[in-house]
Image: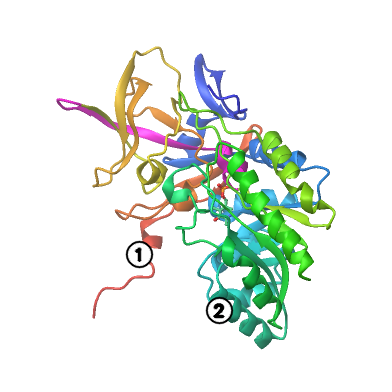
Amino acid sequence: MSSTPTPFEYRPVDGHDELCCEAVPLARIAAEVGTPVYVYSRSELERAYRAFDAALAGTDHLIAFSVKANSSLGILSVLARLGAGADIVSGGELTRWLRAGGAADKVVFSGVGKTEAEMRAALEAGILAFNVESEEELVVLDRVARGLGVRAPVSLRVNPDVDAQTHPYISTGLKQNKFGIAATAARDAFHRAADLPGLDVMGVDCHIGSQLTKTAPFTDAIARLTELVLELDRGGIRLRELDVGGGLGIDYGKDGDAPPPSPGEYGAAVRAALAPVMSLGVRLVCEPGRVIVGNAGALVTRVLYRKRNDVKHFTIVDAAFNDLMRPSLYGAYHPMRPVRRTDRAAQVTDVVGPICETGDFLARDRDLPALEPGDLLAIGAAGAYGFSMASNYNTRPRAAEVLVSGDGYQVIRDRETVDQLLANERVAE
Ligand SMILES: *Cc1c(COP(=O)(O)O)cnc(C)c1O
């Protein structure tokens, strides 16, 4: 199984082996806060950030945490305090990051569809860079910046046309994807951008996909970018930053899956690939998301019912695909463990939620120790793209979130109420 350290381990509590986050039994959190509940380990979050940072030691770099992976204020504030920057994809994420105490001048703003209002807010905040994804966006950003009497710092997102070898929905660096400017058109786009007075062309970036399990796609993409940096330098455009995006995968613990490279292996590969441009004094920017928060979180859910039909056994739990979309959306595998260890025989079951769709499953054909109504189940590696993708489908209030530190915890998000869900609605006149 996984060699990744996990903060979720069984510990003896009152004569039972109870799954704990750090020193806090998950059963205690479930009893006090209710279920479903996302539980995060602060020490694991800090460990993962520091491990990534250490992997890049010796190279001038900025770690811009990808806020969309987990945008809760409680999580962002821990990372901001460690010195992280942020990779944002909306004006809303900018507000979150600033409210969490994050530094504006460590923010890079990605995304193919930035609005003028979002550009203005980011310019007023003084962000580090706009990762611009099209020539039309360049023109609009130039106009918005001149309107405010400032120059917008611009990094052009290049689509390096490499296959990230990941799920097609989270593969972003192929030429058929909507992201970035085609590698073949990039040089011209840089020269056009450099001619626009409202822009300060300062970098190049790429992001080729998520949950990557090999280093070769990263180094192939970086090789394209370093060639471009050298070519632009010869043409009179000197870049200050090279942003390699995010995408490093984590181990979801599925049998037969090769573990992804460690941050150390990733860092070594990235630094080697950057060697051709290091003499130009280019700073490295990384936008990791999943690898920082993924293993720090678990979703704890309670078993409601069981049933069996001619072909299948189902375990119906109180979490659903509105709480954790990844299994339905990407066919993703999440490890699961009963919160109280038992010696009950294993059983193959589909773990499903209450939502009225067949797509509402959290695991299919999973071998789990037999579960009974009232039992708690912990769904692991749920810290990234878990709560941040949650919805209110079926008028389900979103789960609470808890941050554990040592033998204590803090509720960093109260469970949503139905009244909050309805607050912006009115019946027809
Ligand atoms: C989603 C995203 C990331 C983070 O990806 P991870 O796989 O979570 O590391 C980084 N940069 C951009 C532009 C993204 O869209």
The residue positioned 78% from the left and 62% from the top of the image is: 240
Q: Closer to the N terminus: mark 2 or mark 1?
A: 2
Comparing marks 2 and 1, which lies closer to the viewer? 2
The residue positioned 40% from the left and 46% from the top of the image is: 325
Q: Position of residue 159 (x, y in %)?
A: 56, 58
The residue positioned 61% from the left and 40% from the top of the image is: 216
Task: Depth check: give the residue in front, 382 or 274.
Answer: 274
Disc number placed over residue 155 in the picture, else none: none
Residue lying at the far left of the rendered structure: 310
Please check the rendered image and state whether residue 294 is part of the magenta-colored stretch, yes or no: yes
Q: In the figure, is residue 384 to the left or right of 97?
A: left
Marks 2 and 1, Cα distance to the nearest angstrom?
Answer: 30 Å
Q: Position of residue 38 (x, y in %)?
A: 49, 42
Q: Quadrant of residue 282?
A: bottom right
Q: Is mark 1 within 8 Å of ligand 1?
A: no
Q: In the figure, is residue 261 to the left or right of 271?
A: left
Query: Could you tell me the amino acid type at mark 2?
Result: Glu
Disc number placed over residue 422 in the picture, else none: 1
Circle 2 SS class = helix
Task: Depth check: give the residue in front, 119 or 404.
Answer: 119
Give the class, few, some or many, for how many residues have Cα within 10 Å of label 2's Cα (few <14, many ≥20): some
Please check the rendered image and state whether residue 147 is part of the magenta-colored stretch, yes or no: no
The residue positioned 73% from the left and 38% from the top of the image is: 268
User: Can the viewer see residue 252?
Assistant: yes
Please report the bounds of the magenta region as a residue range.
289-311
Query: Could you tell me the amino acid type at mark 1?
Result: Leu
Disc number placed over residue 116 in the picture, else none: 2
